[in-house]
C-alpha cells in the first residue's frame, strides 16, 4: 500500500510522517539517554536502602565521587515517566495521647520559632512519636539540634514510662555535654513527660533552660514534626518483626540521617557535614 493511503488511514499528513521518520534516530538517542539518566536516579533513590524525594535525589547525585548535576525538573520528568514515586507522609496519632496526658507545669516559650537564630548546640528540640509494631505501639524520643538538624540523642521504648525520654537526654549529655552551655534551651510540647517533676528536675540538674510550645500549636516545634514525618516515610517498619529488629532499624536510619540524608536548607549537606562546614568554613562539595 502506498504511503499516501497509509497516512490517510492514520489521519496524518505525508509531511508529518516523513518528519517523524527523519527524527527517529534523535528520538531513539533521547530515549536511550533518558534510560541512562533514570538508572542514575534510581541508584540515588535507593541509596542506603531508603527512598528519597526529588530534592533528596538531586543532593545525593552531588555527593557522588564524580558529582552529577541534574536539575529538579529533569528528575521529576523522569520519575513521572518511569513511575517512580516519592514517599508519602502519614499522620501521627501520638498527638492525641500527648494532649490527653498534659499537666499544668508548663514552661514559657523561650524559643518563639527562632529555630536558626542561636547557632549550633544552643537549641535542642525534643519530641515523642509512636511506631506501630505487631498490633501495638513502640515510642521513640529524639533530640535535635535545631540549627544543624543533627540527631544528638534518641531512645526507643515499648512503654510510655518516662525513662526513655530521660535516656535520650542522657545520650546528649554523654556525647555532646561539653558543647552545651547554661544558655542552651531544650524545647518540647506540653505533654505529660515534659511537664513531669522528673523531667523538670532532670533538665534543671543538667543546667539546661526548659521551653515549651504553646498549647496545641505544632508549628512551635515544626522541625521535630517534619523530622518524624520524613523518618516514617523512609524506615522499613513492615520488615521489623520484634522490638529488637525495630531498634536496629532505628539505629541504622539515625546513622543514615545524620551522615547521608542531605537537606536543601543545610546547603545540600547532611546534618553532620553541615555542622563541620559551620565549624571549619570549608564546603565539601565540588558542585553547588
Image (cartoon, helix red, strand yellow):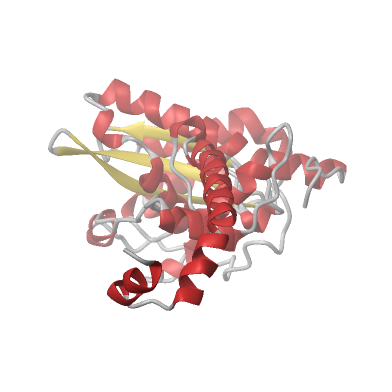
The single residue placed furthest to the left in the displayed view is: 135
The front one of 192 and 272 is 272
The single residue placed furthest to the top in the displayed view is: 244
Relative to 48, say whether 19 is above or below.
Answer: below
The front one of 42 and 241 is 42
Judged left or right of residue 244, residue 179 is right
The front one of 168 and 83 is 83
Relative to 214, say whether 239 is above or below.
Answer: above
- Number of numbered tags placed on the structure image: 0
Judged left or right of residue 230, residue 129 is left
Is residue 234 visible from the viewing direction of this image? yes
Q: Give the image location of residue 2, x and y in percent.
A: 36, 66
Q: Give the image location of residue 223, x and y in percent.
A: 52, 58
Q: Give the image location of residue 203, x and y in percent.
A: 53, 45
The single residue placed furthest to the right in the displayed view is: 281
Q: Give the image location of residue 96, x and y in percent.
A: 23, 60
Q: Residue at horizontal 37%, vertical 38%?
A: 235
Q: Residue at horizontal 48%, vertical 46%?
A: 52
- Quadrant of the drawing holding the N terminus: bottom left
Q: Residue at horizontal 66%, vertical 49%?
A: 148
| Quarter residue 282 falls in | top right
Is residue 180 visible from the viewing direction of this image? no
Q: Residue at horizontal 27%, vertical 62%?
A: 99
Relative to 86, say whether 280 is above or below.
Answer: above
| Quarter residue 210 falls in | bottom right
Amino acid at each position: 500500500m502506498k504511503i499516501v493511503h497509509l497516512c490517510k488511514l492514520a489521519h496524518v499528513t505525508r509531511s508529518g510522517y516523513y518528519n517523524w521518520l527523519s527524527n527517529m534516530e534523535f528520538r531513539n538517542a533521547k530515549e536511550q539517554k533518558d534510560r541512562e539518566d533514570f538508572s542514575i536516579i534510581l541508584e540515588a533513590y535507593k541509596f542506603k536502602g531508603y527512598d528519597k524525594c526529588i530534592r533528596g535525589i538531586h543532593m545525593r547525585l552531588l555527593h557522588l565521587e564524580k558529582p552529577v548535576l541534574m536539575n529538579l525538573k529533569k528528575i521529576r520528568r523522569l520519575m513521572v515517566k518511569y513511575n517512580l514515586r516519592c514517599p508519602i507522609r502519614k499522620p501521627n496519632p501520638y498527638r492525641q495521647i500527648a494532649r490527653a496526658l498534659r499537666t499544668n507545669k508548663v514552661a514559657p516559650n523561650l524559643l518563639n520559632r527562632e529555630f536558626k537564630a542561636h547557632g549550633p548546640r544552643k537549641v535542642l528540640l525534643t519530641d515523642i512519636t509512636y511506631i506501630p509494631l505487631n498490633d501495638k505501639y513502640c515510642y521513640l524520643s529524639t533530640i535535635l539540634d535545631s540549627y544543624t538538624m543533627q540527631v544528638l540523642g534518641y531512645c526507643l521504648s515499648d512503654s510510655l514510662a518516662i525513662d526513655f525520654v530521660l535516656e535520650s537526654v542522657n545520650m546528649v549529655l554523654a556525647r555532646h555535654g561539653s558543647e552545651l552551655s547554661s544558655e542552651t534551651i531544650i524545647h518540647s510540647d506540653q505533654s505529660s513527660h515534659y511537664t513531669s517533676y522528673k523531667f523538670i528536675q532532670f533538665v534543671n540538674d543538667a543546667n539546661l533552660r526548659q521551653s515549651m510550645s504553646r498549647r496545641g500549636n505544632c508549628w512551635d516545634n515544626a522541625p521535630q514534626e517534619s523530622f518524624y514525618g520524613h523518618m516514617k516515610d523512609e524506615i522499613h517498619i513492615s520488615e521489623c518483626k520484634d522490638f529488637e529488629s525495630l531498634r536496629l532499624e532505628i539505629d541504622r536510619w539515625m546513622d543514615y540521617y545524620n551522615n547521608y540524608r542531605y537537606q536543601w536548607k543545610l546547603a545540600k549537606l547532611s546534618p553532620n557535614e553541615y555542622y563541620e562546614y559551620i565549624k571549619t568554613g570549608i564546603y565539601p562539595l565540588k558542585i553547588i
